Image (cartoon, helix red, strand yellow):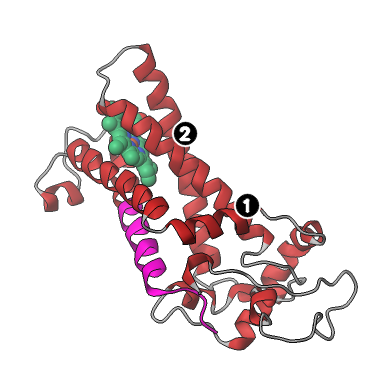
Amino acid sequence: MARTNRATRLLHMAFYLVTIVLLITGWWLATGHDGRPSLLARAAGETDIALHRQVGWGLAALAAVAVTAGFRGARTFVRETLRADRGDGRWLWRWPKAVVTGRFPRHRGHFDPGQRLANLAFVATLGTLVGTGIALTSLHGGPTFVWLVRVHRWSTVVLTVLVIAHVLVASGILPGYRGAWRAMHWGGRVPAATADRLWPAEAHADDPRPEVEGEGEGSQPHDQGGDVLGVD
Ligand code: HEM
Protein backbone atom coordinates (compact mmCIF):
# COMPACT_ATOMS: atom_id res chain seq x y z
CA MET A 1 0.00 0.00 0.00
CA ALA A 2 1.31 3.49 -0.91
CA ARG A 3 1.67 5.52 2.27
CA THR A 4 3.70 8.63 1.26
CA ASN A 5 4.73 10.37 -1.95
CA ARG A 6 8.19 11.49 -3.05
CA ALA A 7 7.81 15.16 -2.07
CA THR A 8 6.82 14.15 1.45
CA ARG A 9 9.75 11.77 1.80
CA LEU A 10 12.19 14.43 0.54
CA LEU A 11 10.78 16.98 2.98
CA HIS A 12 11.03 14.49 5.83
CA MET A 13 14.66 13.72 4.93
CA ALA A 14 15.53 17.43 4.70
CA PHE A 15 13.95 17.98 8.13
CA TYR A 16 15.90 15.18 9.75
CA LEU A 17 19.22 16.17 8.17
CA VAL A 18 19.01 19.78 9.37
CA THR A 19 17.69 18.63 12.77
CA ILE A 20 20.66 16.26 13.23
CA VAL A 21 23.15 19.03 12.40
CA LEU A 22 21.36 21.43 14.78
CA LEU A 23 21.25 18.83 17.57
CA ILE A 24 24.95 18.03 17.21
CA THR A 25 26.15 21.65 17.02
CA GLY A 26 23.59 22.74 19.65
CA TRP A 27 24.71 20.12 22.19
CA TRP A 28 28.34 20.96 21.35
CA LEU A 29 27.69 24.62 22.26
CA ALA A 30 25.55 23.82 25.30
CA THR A 31 28.27 21.64 26.79
CA GLY A 32 30.82 24.47 26.56
CA HIS A 33 32.87 23.30 23.55
CA ASP A 34 32.40 26.42 21.41
CA GLY A 35 36.13 27.27 21.54
CA ARG A 36 36.98 23.94 19.89
CA PRO A 37 35.35 23.13 16.51
CA SER A 38 33.37 19.90 16.31
CA LEU A 39 34.06 17.43 13.48
CA LEU A 40 31.03 18.81 11.64
CA ALA A 41 32.23 22.41 11.96
CA ARG A 42 35.70 21.42 10.79
CA ALA A 43 34.22 19.65 7.75
CA ALA A 44 32.15 22.73 6.95
CA GLY A 45 35.10 25.09 7.56
CA GLU A 46 33.00 27.13 10.02
CA THR A 47 32.75 27.69 13.74
CA ASP A 48 29.98 25.68 15.42
CA ILE A 49 27.98 28.80 16.20
CA ALA A 50 28.14 30.01 12.56
CA LEU A 51 27.17 26.56 11.24
CA HIS A 52 24.36 26.34 13.80
CA ARG A 53 22.95 29.72 12.78
CA GLN A 54 23.12 28.96 9.05
CA VAL A 55 21.48 25.56 9.37
CA GLY A 56 18.99 27.13 11.81
CA TRP A 57 17.88 29.51 9.04
CA GLY A 58 17.70 26.46 6.80
CA LEU A 59 15.24 24.85 9.22
CA ALA A 60 13.13 28.02 9.32
CA ALA A 61 13.11 28.12 5.49
CA LEU A 62 12.12 24.46 5.32
CA ALA A 63 9.19 25.07 7.67
CA ALA A 64 8.12 27.99 5.45
CA VAL A 65 8.29 25.79 2.33
CA ALA A 66 6.27 23.08 4.08
CA VAL A 67 3.36 25.42 4.86
CA THR A 68 3.39 27.30 1.53
CA ALA A 69 4.47 25.01 -1.35
CA GLY A 70 3.22 22.03 0.64
CA PHE A 71 0.02 23.77 1.74
CA ARG A 72 -2.36 20.93 0.83
CA GLY A 73 -0.32 18.32 2.67
CA ALA A 74 0.20 20.68 5.62
CA ARG A 75 -3.56 21.32 5.88
CA THR A 76 -4.31 17.60 5.91
CA PHE A 77 -1.47 17.03 8.39
CA VAL A 78 -3.10 19.53 10.76
CA ARG A 79 -6.59 18.10 10.26
CA GLU A 80 -5.47 14.50 10.76
CA THR A 81 -3.32 15.42 13.76
CA LEU A 82 -6.12 17.32 15.51
CA ARG A 83 -8.78 14.65 15.05
CA ALA A 84 -10.07 12.71 18.05
CA ASP A 85 -12.28 9.65 17.73
CA ARG A 86 -14.13 7.32 20.02
CA GLY A 87 -11.73 4.54 20.97
CA ASP A 88 -8.56 6.67 20.93
CA GLY A 89 -8.24 6.44 24.74
CA ARG A 90 -8.49 2.66 24.55
CA TRP A 91 -5.84 2.63 21.82
CA LEU A 92 -3.45 4.62 24.02
CA TRP A 93 -4.20 2.45 27.05
CA ARG A 94 -3.37 -0.72 25.13
CA TRP A 95 -0.33 0.81 23.38
CA PRO A 96 2.46 -0.37 25.75
CA LYS A 97 1.40 -4.00 25.31
CA ALA A 98 0.71 -3.69 21.58
CA VAL A 99 4.22 -2.34 20.99
CA VAL A 100 5.41 -5.85 21.84
CA THR A 101 2.53 -8.04 20.60
CA GLY A 102 1.60 -6.02 17.50
CA ARG A 103 -2.09 -6.33 18.42
CA PHE A 104 -3.06 -2.66 18.20
CA PRO A 105 -6.72 -1.80 18.67
CA ARG A 106 -8.27 -0.31 15.53
CA HIS A 107 -8.24 3.46 15.10
CA ARG A 108 -9.55 5.85 12.50
CA GLY A 109 -7.70 8.37 10.36
CA HIS A 110 -4.28 8.61 8.79
CA PHE A 111 -2.28 8.74 12.04
CA ASP A 112 -2.69 6.53 15.09
CA PRO A 113 -3.43 8.39 18.36
CA GLY A 114 0.21 8.06 19.48
CA GLN A 115 1.46 9.57 16.22
CA ARG A 116 -0.97 12.46 16.68
CA LEU A 117 0.49 13.22 20.12
CA ALA A 118 4.03 12.92 18.74
CA ASN A 119 3.16 15.29 15.86
CA LEU A 120 1.90 17.90 18.33
CA ALA A 121 5.03 17.56 20.46
CA PHE A 122 7.37 17.83 17.43
CA VAL A 123 5.60 20.88 16.02
CA ALA A 124 5.53 22.65 19.41
CA THR A 125 9.19 21.87 20.18
CA LEU A 126 10.59 22.69 16.73
CA GLY A 127 8.40 25.83 16.61
CA THR A 128 9.80 26.97 19.95
CA LEU A 129 13.38 26.27 18.80
CA VAL A 130 12.92 28.23 15.57
CA GLY A 131 11.20 31.14 17.35
CA THR A 132 13.73 31.45 20.17
CA GLY A 133 16.63 30.71 17.79
CA ILE A 134 15.70 33.54 15.43
CA ALA A 135 15.27 35.89 18.41
CA LEU A 136 18.73 34.84 19.69
CA THR A 137 20.39 35.73 16.37
CA SER A 138 19.37 39.38 16.87
CA LEU A 139 20.43 39.72 20.54
CA HIS A 140 23.81 40.09 22.19
CA GLY A 141 23.44 39.41 25.89
CA GLY A 142 21.03 40.83 28.47
CA PRO A 143 18.25 39.23 30.53
CA THR A 144 16.05 38.43 27.51
CA PHE A 145 18.97 36.63 25.86
CA VAL A 146 19.59 34.58 29.03
CA TRP A 147 15.90 33.66 29.25
CA LEU A 148 15.73 32.72 25.56
CA VAL A 149 18.86 30.53 25.79
CA ARG A 150 17.25 28.72 28.72
CA VAL A 151 14.04 28.02 26.74
CA HIS A 152 16.11 27.06 23.67
CA ARG A 153 18.20 24.65 25.76
CA TRP A 154 15.22 22.99 27.48
CA SER A 155 13.44 22.61 24.15
CA THR A 156 16.58 20.86 22.90
CA VAL A 157 16.35 18.37 25.78
CA VAL A 158 12.69 17.67 24.91
CA LEU A 159 13.49 17.38 21.18
CA THR A 160 16.33 14.95 21.90
CA VAL A 161 13.98 12.66 23.85
CA LEU A 162 11.35 12.92 21.08
CA VAL A 163 13.87 12.11 18.35
CA ILE A 164 15.20 9.06 20.24
CA ALA A 165 11.65 7.79 20.86
CA HIS A 166 10.67 8.45 17.23
CA VAL A 167 13.70 6.58 15.86
CA LEU A 168 13.02 3.68 18.23
CA VAL A 169 9.40 3.38 17.06
CA ALA A 170 9.84 4.21 13.36
CA SER A 171 12.92 2.04 12.82
CA GLY A 172 10.88 -1.11 13.51
CA ILE A 173 13.15 -2.36 16.32
CA LEU A 174 10.02 -2.78 18.47
CA PRO A 175 8.09 -5.88 17.28
CA GLY A 176 4.74 -4.06 16.98
CA TYR A 177 6.20 -1.52 14.56
CA ARG A 178 8.11 -3.94 12.35
CA GLY A 179 8.10 -2.65 8.77
CA ALA A 180 6.93 0.87 9.69
CA TRP A 181 10.15 2.48 8.42
CA ARG A 182 9.18 1.63 4.83
CA ALA A 183 6.38 4.21 5.00
CA MET A 184 8.96 7.02 4.80
CA HIS A 185 11.77 5.43 2.78
CA TRP A 186 12.47 4.09 -0.72
CA GLY A 187 9.10 3.90 -2.44
CA GLY A 188 7.04 4.84 0.64
CA ARG A 189 5.03 1.62 0.34
CA VAL A 190 4.23 -0.76 3.19
CA PRO A 191 3.09 -4.40 2.91
CA ALA A 192 -0.69 -4.83 3.24
CA ALA A 193 -0.30 -6.72 6.54
CA THR A 194 1.76 -3.88 8.06
CA ALA A 195 -0.76 -1.27 6.91
CA ASP A 196 -3.61 -3.34 8.30
CA ARG A 197 -1.87 -3.61 11.69
CA LEU A 198 -0.78 0.04 11.99
CA TRP A 199 -3.18 2.13 9.88
CA PRO A 200 -6.31 0.00 9.44
CA ALA A 201 -8.68 2.76 8.30
CA GLU A 202 -6.40 3.68 5.45
CA ALA A 203 -5.58 0.09 4.57
CA HIS A 204 -9.31 -0.51 4.11
CA ALA A 205 -10.18 2.86 2.58
CA ASP A 206 -11.34 1.21 -0.65
CA ASP A 207 -13.29 -1.44 1.22
CA PRO A 208 -17.00 -1.08 0.31
CA ARG A 209 -18.07 -2.46 3.70
CA PRO A 210 -18.54 0.08 6.50
CA GLU A 211 -16.90 -2.26 9.03
CA VAL A 212 -14.12 -4.80 8.81
CA GLU A 213 -14.91 -8.26 10.08
CA GLY A 214 -13.39 -9.19 13.39
CA GLU A 215 -12.89 -5.66 14.64
CA GLY A 216 -14.47 -6.70 17.87
CA GLU A 217 -15.95 -4.58 20.58
CA GLY A 218 -15.58 -0.84 20.27
CA SER A 219 -14.77 -1.09 16.59
CA GLN A 220 -15.06 1.94 14.38
CA PRO A 221 -16.28 2.24 10.82
CA HIS A 222 -13.39 2.84 8.47
CA ASP A 223 -12.88 6.10 6.77
CA GLN A 224 -10.53 7.75 4.34
CA GLY A 225 -7.21 8.78 5.81
CA GLY A 226 -6.88 11.71 3.41
CA ASP A 227 -3.86 12.74 1.39
CA VAL A 228 -1.68 13.82 4.27
CA LEU A 229 1.95 13.16 3.56
CA GLY A 230 0.99 13.11 -0.03
CA VAL A 231 -1.09 10.05 -0.81
CA ASP A 232 -3.55 11.57 -3.24
C1 HEM B 1 16.51 21.48 15.87
C2 HEM B 1 16.55 22.76 16.21
C3 HEM B 1 17.55 23.37 17.14
C4 HEM B 1 18.24 22.83 18.19
C5 HEM B 1 18.16 21.40 18.71
C6 HEM B 1 19.06 23.88 18.79
C7 HEM B 1 19.87 23.73 19.89
C8 HEM B 1 20.68 24.72 20.43
C9 HEM B 1 21.47 24.59 21.63
C10 HEM B 1 21.49 23.35 22.55
C11 HEM B 1 22.15 25.73 21.81
C12 HEM B 1 23.14 26.05 22.93
C13 HEM B 1 22.43 26.81 24.03
C14 HEM B 1 23.39 26.98 25.19
O1 HEM B 1 24.34 27.72 25.04
O2 HEM B 1 23.15 26.32 26.20
C15 HEM B 1 21.80 26.62 20.72
C16 HEM B 1 22.28 27.90 20.56
C17 HEM B 1 21.85 28.77 19.57
N1 HEM B 1 20.88 28.54 18.60
FE1 HEM B 1 19.91 26.80 18.34
N2 HEM B 1 18.88 25.03 18.07
C18 HEM B 1 17.95 24.77 17.06
C19 HEM B 1 17.47 25.66 16.12
C20 HEM B 1 17.91 26.97 15.98
C21 HEM B 1 17.42 27.90 15.00
C22 HEM B 1 16.28 27.60 14.01
C23 HEM B 1 18.12 29.06 15.16
C24 HEM B 1 17.99 30.36 14.41
C25 HEM B 1 17.92 30.51 13.13
C26 HEM B 1 19.04 28.86 16.25
C27 HEM B 1 19.92 29.81 16.74
C28 HEM B 1 20.76 29.67 17.83
C29 HEM B 1 21.65 30.69 18.32
C30 HEM B 1 21.82 32.09 17.74
C31 HEM B 1 22.33 30.13 19.40
C32 HEM B 1 23.47 30.75 20.22
C33 HEM B 1 23.15 31.52 21.36
C34 HEM B 1 24.53 31.99 21.86
O3 HEM B 1 25.07 32.88 21.20
O4 HEM B 1 25.00 31.41 22.83
N3 HEM B 1 18.91 27.58 16.73
N4 HEM B 1 20.91 25.98 19.91
**Residue 30 visible, this orientation:** no
Main SS category, magenta section: helix
- Name the residue carrying label 1: 117
> Position of 102 compared to 34: left or right?
right
Q: Position of residue 104 (x, y in %)?
A: 73, 72
SS class of the residue under badge 1? helix
Image quadrant in which you'd find residue 94: bottom right
The numbered dot on residue 154 is: 2
Residue displayed at 72% across by 75% down: 101
Which of the pair 25/138 is nearer the observer?
Answer: 138
Picture quarter with the N terminus: bottom right
Q: Which residues are magenta?
A: 1-20
Q: Position of residue 166 (x, y in %)?
A: 52, 59
Q: Is residue 51 magenta?
A: no
Q: Amino acid at mark 1?
A: Leu
Q: Amino acid at mark 2?
A: Trp
Q: Are marks 1 and 2 in contact (CB under 8 Å)?
A: no
**Residue 145 visible, this orientation:** yes
Few, some or many C-alpha atoms within 10 Å of disc 2 (few <14, some 14-19, many ≥20)? Answer: some
Residue displayed at 47% across by 40% down: 157
SS class of the residue under badge 2? helix
Image quadrant in which you'd find residue 136: top left
Which of the pair 199/34 is nearer the observer?
Answer: 199
Asked if the beta carbon under badge 1 is closer than 8 A to the nearest atom of ligand 1, the reply is: no
